[in-house]
Image (spheres, rainbow, N blue to C red):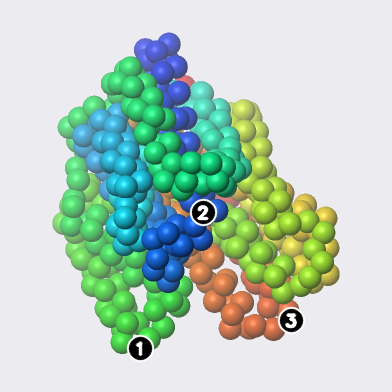
Amino acid sequence: MKETTLAPAAALSNKSGPAFAAVVTALFLAAVDSTIVSTVLPTISGQLGHPTLYPWVMSAFLLPVALFAPLAGACGDKLGVSTTLKACLLLFLAASVLAALSPTMPLLILARALQGIGAGGIIVLSYALLAALFDASRRGKMQGMLSGVWGLAAVAGPLLGSLLSATLGWRAIFWLNIPVGLVALLLLFMTPGVSKGAAKARLDGWAQLALIIFTCSLLLLVSGSMALPGITGMLGAALALALLMLIARVRQRPASSPVPLPFFNHRPLFAVMMLVLLSSAGLYASVTLLPLAMNHHAGAGMSTGLLIMLAALGWVGGAAFCGGKLANIGYRRMAFYGMLLLTFGALLMIPAIGRLNTLPMALALLLIGLGMGLTATTTLVLAQNAAPAEQLGTWTATVQFLRNLGAALGVNVLATVQLQLSGVYAFQICFIILGVTMLVGLLFTRFLPRAYPAR
């Protein structure tokens, strides 16, 4: 499997400062909007009414971020990464204006869904643009640095939301996006054009639609939120039909597959798929199960928010370390260390939750975050370095899509297990399952290349 880089990367390296600033700014906007609204949901519900709908203010944003990632990557390959990123940013800003002006809850939910589509494209294409501007020798370091944006957004989002809501009102949260987004847009226009109009890039709209329907149906079925027999049957039928349609379209037009076929045909890339799914399930299931477990007990010595922040900081630290050391340590060893830390963290959580011991829980979450940082950066950089230059957006989008899918599946499956068991040892059993799953991930690291071939 030959590694490729874009031909103009070296020539553009001296002009990539505005591009990096644009990527950081745009990515921060997309990342912070996934958390900034959470603290003001009661206020929004009180003003707009329809209290039963307020959870959709979050869900309507997060679901399109996952579902539209492959489509954004394919459009980036077809129309140009820079051009598509600008379009997604404009959609995000227009949706922010609509959200700020929304007089009703349904209209706000619609605006949040449009924001989610734009944010999904921003996230995927920001990573793709950075990969296009830097060759393999520096790609790992730059991608690792981007993880700091997620850490900053995780901390700043709730704080900014509370501050703006208390001083200027909740609508100011969405108005804030406009000046920041315009700065990012201006910087993008100062960025050298890369990955423009690749002649070989193809886009199959029907295959993309089939993948969206398949994924949405799968997540709704696994979540158990649509447990009525009639609805379950309809979702199952939609799942089967979407899968058949997707297979038919991929067989007819294999070059336009939403998930590139080399991910299934080459052992290193198939291992990347499995590691992305498993590591994401490990992190997000852990930070979801822990608050539920602590709610069953009283007298915790540390708040749930501070504990979860340790996982976020661990991810940032692990990604930064991986970005700086990946070229020396290599793909296989770095991913092995990442999955090992995830395994230790999940297994350490078993006795910690049983005794409600705060310090072991904090250490476990820190290990899980560090492991996620190592694994996530390694798999993303490996996929980007292996991608054909004309498909860099699609390959980056595939990793992001699998990460979101793994997170959703991990949370929904283990939450369902916990609810079914609903006993004293339910959470310990969930983390036993999680620890065994992370051990399985260790096996897949054996299929990754040893060395990091830098060019």
Q: Quadrant of residue 287?
A: bottom right
Q: Nearer the viewer, mark 2 or mark 1?
A: 2
Q: Position of residue 328 (x, y in %)?
A: 63, 28
Element under disc 1: helix
The amino acid type found where label 1 is placed reads: Pro
Q: Nearer the viewer, mark 3 or mark 2?
A: 2
Write down the residue under mark 2. 40
Write down the residue under mark 3. 424
The amino acid type found where label 3 is placed reads: Val
Can you say whether 277 is above or below 138 in the image? below
Q: Characterize the local packing of mark 2: few (<14), some (14-19) or many (20 or more) Cα atoms within 10 angstroms.
A: many
The amino acid type found where label 2 is placed reads: Val
Element under disc 3: loop
* Left or right of residue 367: residue 82: left
Measured in 3D between alpha carbons, the distance from the residue under mark 1 to the one under mark 3, in whole angstroms, is 30 Å
Write down the residue under mark 1. 229
Can you say whether 270 is above or below 395 in the image? below
Q: Position of residue 210 (x, y in %)?
A: 24, 62
Q: Identify the residue at horizontal 38%, vertical 25% (top origin).
A: 183
Measured in 3D between alpha carbons, the distance from the residue under mark 2 to the one under mark 1, in whole angstroms, is 35 Å
Q: Identify the residue at horizontal 41%, vertical 18% (top origin).
A: 18
Which of 91 and 332 lies nearest the eye of the viewer? 91
Q: Position of residue 242 (x, y in %)?
A: 25, 68
Which quadrant would the N terminus be assigned to in this image?
Answer: top left
Element under disc 2: helix
Which of 378 and 41 lies nearest the eye of the viewer? 41
Q: Earlier in the sequence, mark 3 or mark 2?
A: 2
Q: Identify the residue at horizontal 42%, vertical 30% (top origin).
A: 180
Q: Earlier in the sequence, mark 2 or mark 1?
A: 2
* Left or right of residue 121: residue 285: right
Can you say whether 142 is above or below 357 in the image? above
